[in-house]
Every structure is written in C-alpha cells, then in structure tokens.
Image: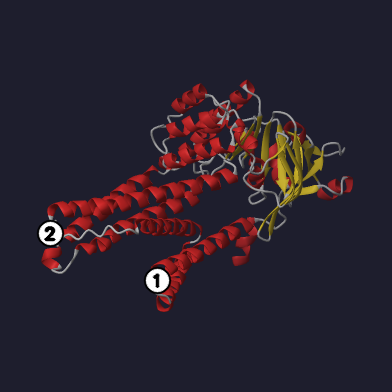
Amino acid sequence: MINCVNVRKKFGRKIVLDELNLQIDEPKLVGLVGRNGVGKSTLMSLLAGLEKPTKGKVEVLEQSAFDNLYVSVNSIYIHPNMTFPANLSLRELCQMGAQFYMHWDQALSEKLFTYFDIPLHQTFQQLSTGMKSMFATIFGLATRAAVTLLDEPVNGIDEGLRKDMYRAILKEYIAYPRLIIISSHLLDELAHLLEEIVILHDGKVLVHDNIDDFASSHMIWEGELSRMLAAYPDALILERSPFGGDRVLVPSHIAGDFQQQAISAKDLYLYLTAEKKGSIDDVFSNNE
Amino acid sequence: MMSFQTMSSNQLSRFFIKWTWRNNRQIVLFTIVSQLIALALALVTEDQRMQGFADFQFTSIYYNLVPLIVAGCLSTMMLGAALKQQRLEPFQFPKHVKQRGSIVIAVLYSAALTLAIILTRYVIGIYFLLIEPEQTILRANEQVWLQAMLLFVWLMMACILGFLYAINKVYAFLVCIVSLVAMIVVAQLFEHVLYIGTASIAVILAAALIWMIRQEEAV
C-alpha cells in the first residue's frame, strides 16, 4: 500500500530524511514514532503527496504520491496544523468530504460528532484545540480512505475523551480495515491499538516490526555492571547505582545469569533513540 | 454520483472554483459594501460641487470614479491574497487544477468588477443628466473599451499585488515602491503616461510574482 525507496528530503540545507526505506503491503494499524524533529510529519506529508521527495521514490497505492489525484482521494492526512477551509461551517466541510471521498460514511460522522458534542454550525477556526483535534480525527475516519495518516490525532484532547477516541479508531479499523498510520508521542497510550511500530531516527527507519515482537526483542538486566558488560559488551547502560543494581538493556536472545525484567515498547523506543548528551541535571549542576 | 478520481481536468477545475467561491464569500460581501461606500462618496462629492467647487464640471465624474476604482483594487488585492493563502485542506487538488482555477477566478472577478464600475459610471451620468440636464456635459466618449481594458489591467495588477502580499509582505511593499518610481520616470519621459506607466508596472509586478513563486518552490 505504501512503498518508500531510498527517500531523501531536504529543506534548504537541512536533510530531514535520508535513504529512508519503508514498505507496508496490507491494511494495518501502524504507530509512527520518533523524537522531535526526526521527520515524522515530513514522511507523512510525502505519503500524502503534499511534498515531493528530493531523491528516491514514494508510492502510495502503487502510484507516485506527489500531486496525484488518485492518491489524494484515497488517502487523508490529518495533522495538528491543519486549517480546513476557514470560512465554511463544519457541516459544509462534511458535505464537501462526502463529495470528495468516495467511501465517506455520513452516518458514522454524524454519530461521532454528536457523541463528542462537536457544534457543526461553527467554523473550524472557532473550535478549541481539543475540539479541532476531535473534528479532524473524526473527519479522517469518516473518509474511510484506504490510507489514513493521523499525525498527533489526540493533541489537546482531555484524557477521558482520548480513550474514547482511541476506541473509535480501533472499532472503525476493525469494521473497515485500511492502513492507518498514527504518529504520536503518547506511545504508552497507543501501544494496545497498534499492530506494527515504525521508529524513525536520524532520518531513517530504525525499527519496523510487530509491536509485541519489538517489545520482547530486548530485556533489562539488573546486577553488577562489570559482570553484565563481560557477559554482553554491547549492552546499553540504562542506570548506574552506587549501591549495586546497575541496569542494562540487552537483546532477549542473550543468556545471562542476572535479574531480568521485561521492557515496554515505549521505554525500549526511548532508550533506543536517546541522545547521548548527558541528563537535564547536568545543565543545572553547571550553574551551581 | 461521479467520483473525483474519474473526473476530467475541467470538471475538477469547476469544483475547485465552486469551493473556492464558497470559502471566500466574505470577499464578495466586502466588494459590494466597499463599492456602495465609494458610490455614496462619489454622489456626495458631486452633490457638493455647487457649494464647494463652483467650476466643477461634469467631467469630474472621472475623479469621482476614483474611489470606486480604489475600492475595487482593494477588493481584488484581498482576493489575490486569499487565493494564494488558500489551501482547501484536506482536499488536495492537483497543482495544475489549483493554478488554472485561481487564474479563472481572478480573471472572472476582475472582469465582472470592471463591467460593474463602467456601468456605474453611466448610471451616475444618467442620474445627473436627469436632475441637472443644463449643467451636465456627458462625456461618454468613444474610448470606453480602452478604458475598460485599462481598468481590467489595474484590477488584475491589484490581484497580483495580493498574491505578492500573501507570499512576502516586505517584498510586496518594495515592489510597490519600485512601481511608483517607475511611474515617475515614465511620467518624465513619455506623453502617454497612463498607458505606458500601466504597462511598465504590470511588467514589474508580473516579474516579481514569477520570481517569488520560484523562490517559494525552491525551498
């Protein structure tokens, strides 16, 4: 359904994505995660056909994505800076959505708008931040587009309604399977929805795996650091304690006689993408 | 219902134009209100001519039309800025459809406004012919089409200025200053300042617009 081959994207002199390869062939719920500025939104823009890759190939539904009407009407990209036509009411936007997207589900949109109390007589600009996110996400689901790209879909939504929104996404996906890619920093909240995870790091795909396999691919050892490093020299040091009980991250298949702990997908992602620049405490200790 | 993905380029353009109009309804309202205000100003000025301007002849209709033209240029400039800024997200039309649709809208709007202002001129003329026939020298001259063309070009230039303003405000002001300087130079060198000045400013604006759009695309 999507195929990115050796994709590079530059903005001015800044290279955001470089030699990126990603292929997803069937409907799935995929989480796209990465640290700030790593290129998640850029990748989604490329997939939505809004941007042209500087180098490489971006194909969606077996067609080149950029400036392609077929891709436009079969995909939707919802993002936090989305504006929607500023002077039209939400009801008018839905009417336009029904015309533009072949599989638009009017009944679903109406039920969800009613449930989330979204005032359809207002314009998009008149909504609060959370309401904007809810409207945009519901709009994205109602399109039933074959490729649905949701960038921070719960941005600004309160915690109670976020759960409802996740549930709406899941139920809609189960009822009408399609490729839904969700980009979010709230991986712990999202993890139970996802089938696959894609981690971007340094402009490339660092991990593309089944989310359960990803979480179980590593484990934490707790014990004496020198012994753990002797057992596995490439272990990632997570925590050093003056009282013993140091913690390191190792691949699950490595055997070792240490206390072992499972690790969540979110923590593993954070450790794997951590920048080696010390801790925030170092900033303050320099001032003292 | 026909699907968007099977529509021809012309059908898509029609949809783009229709949705753009729906999204920019306030410009139509602004145009009507500003033209009515300018018209009222023209009539009030004309009404006062015997008190304040004893020798003011009906030829002043040309000058009274200036507020209408200025208001029209402001409206077209707003339209240009709105067209440039408009993204119609999440409905992604192909680039050539957006470009063609925007040009069609700008041309149709400018043409309709030109026609409205030219007609207004004659309505004002007829009005004064009816109330003060002895003082009125109706100057409906034979060059009406030339005037209409000139007005149309000015409205289109205002639209381009709106485009420039939406891309970069500082550059838009700089281009305005360059255009003014060009106008002064033309006035010093040529007899037909209005025609040659209009042509030179149109060239400056079009060149600036092309350059800025290329700069934008290069980013």
**Residue type at numbered disc 1:** Val
Task: Give the number of the disc on residue B21.
Answer: none
Cα distance, mark 1 to mark 2? 33 Å
How far from the left and from the top, in percent, is residue A140? 56, 33
Chain of the residue under the numbered disc 2 shown in the image: B
Q: Is residue B149 visible?
A: yes
Mark nearer the N terminus (1 vs 2)? 2
Three-letter amino acid code at the position of disc 2: Glu
Residues tagged by mark 1 and mark 2 found on one chain of the structure: yes
Q: Which residue is mark 1?
A: B193
**For the N terminus of chain B, which image quadrant?**
top right
Give neighbour class at mark 1: few <14, some 14-19, many 20+ (Cα, 10 Å).
some
Q: Residue at x 43, y 74 (%)?
A: B186
In the displayed structure, does residue B144 sit left or right of residue A253?
Answer: left
Query: What kind of element bears circle 1?
Result: helix
Q: Nearer the viewer, residue A151 or B95?
A: B95
Residue B134, label in figure? 2
Q: Quadrant of the C terminus of chain B?
A: bottom right
Q: Secondary structure at mark 2?
A: loop
Most extreme residue toward the left, as rendered?
A: B51
Q: Residue furthest bottom?
A: B188
Q: Is residue A165 left or right of residue A280?
A: left
